[in-house]
Amino acid sequence: MIDLAEIIIEEGLVQNGSIKQRETVRAIITNKKNEILMVYSTVFDDYTFPGGGIKENESHEDALNRELKEELGAKKITVIKPFGQTKELRYGVKGSDNVYLQTSYYYICEVHEFGSQELVGRELEHGLSPTWVLPEVALQKNESVLPNDLHQTKGLKTVLIRENCVLKTLKETKNA
């Protein structure tokens, strides 16, 4: 899989010991209007690609099916092809001093049927809702809120940087 950006390192990161590995999968779903299906957070006022962590002994496709069912209510998906990956060196999202090397794998997917979301944990807390949005609109919104305190919290500083790298690549690919 191709790298969509150079490694993203959380500002202020101090490595004191071992680095834990974390892998995630994320879906890129488009429609005929060139919009992308993203999850909008009412708490963070931003757009992120649907997806999340891969559980032990879970394939990328199984993780995508589980995560898209939770966040989008997707009942049946097809993984069309890999798009690329990003790497982040960051703190954990729970504010601990644990350092993670997170690799996020992005896949072009198609959803054939939607049902109800099945949000759990942080997904519920963050007020996630599936939203069709043009890549440039999502990028503009994310860039405008990036300096906000919530996005500058330890463990969250790299999230929008990562998503914006992917949005920029999609935009460039579309214009090529």
Image: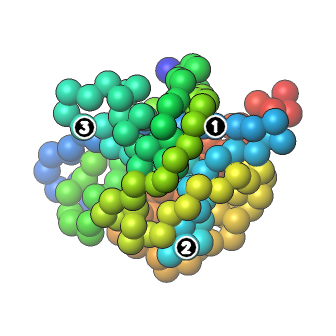
- The reply to whether callout 1 and callout 2 are in contact (CB within 8 Å) is no
- The reply to whether callout 2 and callout 3 are in contact (CB within 8 Å) is no
Residue type (three-letter) at the residue carrying disc 3: Lys
Q: Pointer 1: what residue?
A: 29
SS for tag 3? loop
Of residues 130 and 156, the one drawn nearer to the viewer in this rendering: 130
Q: Pointer 2: what residue?
A: 42
Of residues 41 and 10, the one drawn nearer to the viewer in this rendering: 41
* First in residue order: circle 2 vs circle 3: 2
> Which mark, residue 126?
none
Residue 124 appears in the rendering: yes
Q: Pointer 3: what residue?
A: 55
- The reply to whether callout 1 and callout 3 are in contact (CB within 8 Å) is no
Quadrant of res 139: bottom right
The answer for how far apart the CA atoms under marks 1 and 3 are is: 22 Å
Residue 40 coordinates in the image, percent (x, y): 58, 62
SS for tag 2? loop
Q: How many marks?
A: 3
* First in residue order: circle 1 vs circle 2: 1
Residue 89 coordinates in the image, percent (x, y): 36, 48
> Where 94 sits versus 70, above or below?
below
Residue type (three-letter) at the residue carrying disc 1: Ile
Residue sitting at x 34%, y 54%: 90
Of residues 113 and 78, the one drawn nearer to the viewer in this rendering: 113
Residue type (three-letter) at the residue carrying disc 2: Thr
Q: Is 151 displayed left or right of 40 in the figure?
A: left
